[in-house]
Image (spheres, rainbow, N blue to C red):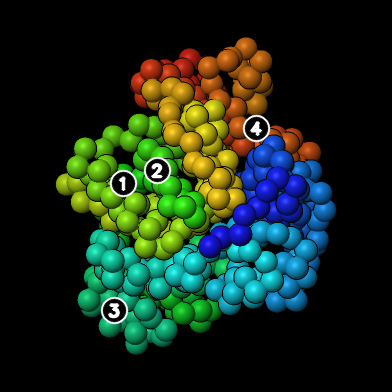
Amino acid sequence: MAQRHLPGSTIGIIGSSLSAAVLAQTAGRLGYRVASLVTEEQNPVRQHALWQTVVEDYEDEALKYFGARVDLAIPEKGILSNQALRVLNQHTDLPMSDDLMAITTDRLIEKVYLDTHHVLVAPFSMVTNMTDLKEAVEYIGYPCVLKATQRHIAKADDHVILYSENDFNLAEAKLAQTTCLLEAWIPAEKQVSLIVIRNERGEILIYPPFDIRHEGMPVARQVAYPAQLMRPVEEEMRRIAYHLANQLNLRGSLTLKFLVTSAGVMYVNQASIGMNEESMFTIGTMSVSHYEATLRAMFDMALPSLTLNHPAGIALPLTAIDTDKLMIQYLTRTDWGFAIFPSNSLHQPIQGYVNVTGDSLESCRRQIEATELLLN
């Protein structure tokens, strides 16, 4: 049985990303105190935290100290190892099952878990040296992707794409750093994200699938709804999300990343806890944001029904937007969603996303072009 945390309890957020700051802000609005554990004194979470602890790294002693002073801990994804999560769990309420700790920190365990539960994933193999790699390539073929198995290590997201033996020197350098996972390259037509929320009492809320796109100049990561999917594909995504949420005894949120081919075949490319960039899209466009729903689930509050505030929307990162033109829209529009937050940078004082909404995706695109938001 999960511990019940009522307003006035202290929520400890570990990490300093913008998503961590939004989560802290949301916790405050729900009536909770927020404490912060970070490795840099200047960070966006600071303004929303009652107190902050700055450490050189997230070692065991720092986690023990922090855990003992908070009622519930929420670590950012990809910054703690499985062992570190277990240490933290001994000193505070950490809303993660053993399986969830393992699959969200180790890519190999994640793939094995999904495969065991009959979820389609790209062919994969663990590799520790060049001999392993050459054998795995014979099975998987080119092109393929070499990834670090552990998500918390430095440069864990710097993957190496192998097109031929000419890329073995890059792979050898990667293998010298850590144990890796070799994965087949999937020629995907779409990248789709699906968020599922579950509380301790077993209530489940599933957000609609979002398209993840890389468009514009400069190239920007955009999030769009509705995802253009065949009905059976979307239904299968929802079935997988529901199944995994229950199997993992989820308490909080899980984001599934799918790769969908032109033939409608879909692969689960990632299963992760915590907030992702696409979470910003839910602010203003959905009746309840990903941030609020996640906290409600962790506190074992009832989950509300989910409705769409607009039929369609496209979220644009502020890094790809002309700030002056954005401010014109910010001051005059009531139909768009603005997930805008102050930053610590003097050169770029704000950060976040603008959610352009409309009756259709084409309507959203026309608005983006008409307002000339995107940088040239």
User: Marks 4 and 2: CB-CB under 8 Å?
Assistant: no
In three-dimensional space, the C-alpha distance between marks 1 and 3, rounded to whole angstroms, equals 32 Å
- Label 4 packing within 10 angstroms: few (<14), some (14-19), many (20+): some
* SS under mark 1: helix
Ranked by sequence position, the earlier of labels 3 and 2 is 3
Identify the residue under disc 4: 340
Q: Are marks 1 and 2 in contact (CB under 8 Å)?
A: yes
Kind of residue sitting beneath label 4: Ile
Distance from disc 1 to disc 2, alpha carbons, whole Å, reads 7 Å
Q: Is residue 119 left or right of residue 104?
A: left
x and y percent of residue 186 in the render? Answer: 28, 57
| Residue placed most toward the observer, 366 or 303 | 303
Labels in figure, total: 4
Under mark 2, the amino acid is Ile
Residue behind mark 2: 206
Q: Residue 36 in the image: x percent, y percent?
A: 75, 55
